Image (cartoon, rainbow, N blue to C red):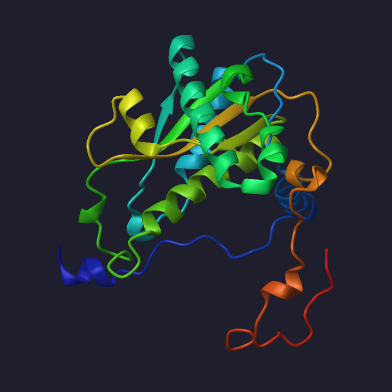
Amino acid sequence: MSSETHSRAPETIPAQPFAEADRAAVYRAIHERRDMRHFCGGEVAPDVLLRLLRAAHHAPSVGFMQPWRFIRVRDAQLRQGIHAVVEQERLQTARALGEREEDFMQLKVQGVLDAAEVLVVAMPPGRDAHVFGRRTLPEMDVASAACAIQNLWLAARAEGLGLGWVSLFDPEVLAALLQMPVGSRPLAVLCLGPVSAYYAEPMLQQQKWASRAPLQDMLYDDLWGQRAAGAPPQA
């Protein structure tokens, strides 16, 4: 590739804000997105599913590595197998929580069986070949794949669908179940489909498991721990 090609200015589009209604819709999707655990069957229309996957595929990625693969699990027996893997880890996690074991066991993970669609997001083998942006931060493949999941999540909310991210599984066991190649790694089991309603606030917050920390506690000026001047009120 010639040096002229390298130095060519990128094509651009005008840097203008969205119209007020469009801008409000983006923020609404962000604030109303929920990690759903309750689904009501139904289906996701093929054109809608394609829109969601395109939204995910347009996520940013470090070095433009695009470290995401989507496995659509349609076989009922395979879903049962994934649910068994999830249940096994749910029990292990509950035991590891000690005094909160009983509370945790009240949090069921049935979306794998009940949701209209199950998508496994996995990272492919060969990611080590991507050095750009990963030489000192190899975990940027995970961060990039998470951006794809967030795109899918927000698009699902805009479409009036629910999505839940299940991370209770042994990645090696799930990879074997899905016959994934050596070097690949499953990152998420996504349950997607119609829901009767969205939680008014995050379910774990409703269940008194945890609560959202104040934004001002997350903001520093210049140095770690140095509270930001004029930090915003909690919202």
- Quadrant where the C terminus sits is bottom right
Q: Residue 68, how many percent across, how many down? A: 39, 42
Count of numbered tags: 0
10, above or below 187, in the image:
below
Q: Residue visible at 62% across and 39% down?
A: 155
Q: Residue 196, how many percent across, how many down? A: 79, 23
Q: Residue visible at 52% across and 37% down?
A: 92
Is 88 left or right of 157, judged from the image as shown?
A: left
Determine which quarter of the picture holds residue 182: top left
Q: Residue furthest front?
A: 99
171, above or below 30, in the image:
above
- Quadrant where the N terminus sits is bottom left
**Residue nearest the observer in this picture, 150 or 171:** 171
Q: Residue 165, how many percent across, how many down? A: 57, 38
- Can residue 124 be spotted in the picture? yes
Is 222 left or right of 125, judged from the image as shown?
A: right
Q: Residue 206, how many percent across, how many down? A: 82, 44
Is 59 left or right of 16, judged from the image as shown?
A: left
Determine which quarter of the picture holds residue 87: top right
Q: Residue furthest left?
A: 1
**Residue nearest the observer in this picture, 170 or 73:** 170
- Can residue 178 be spotted in the picture? no
Q: Residue visible at 63% across and 23% down?
A: 110
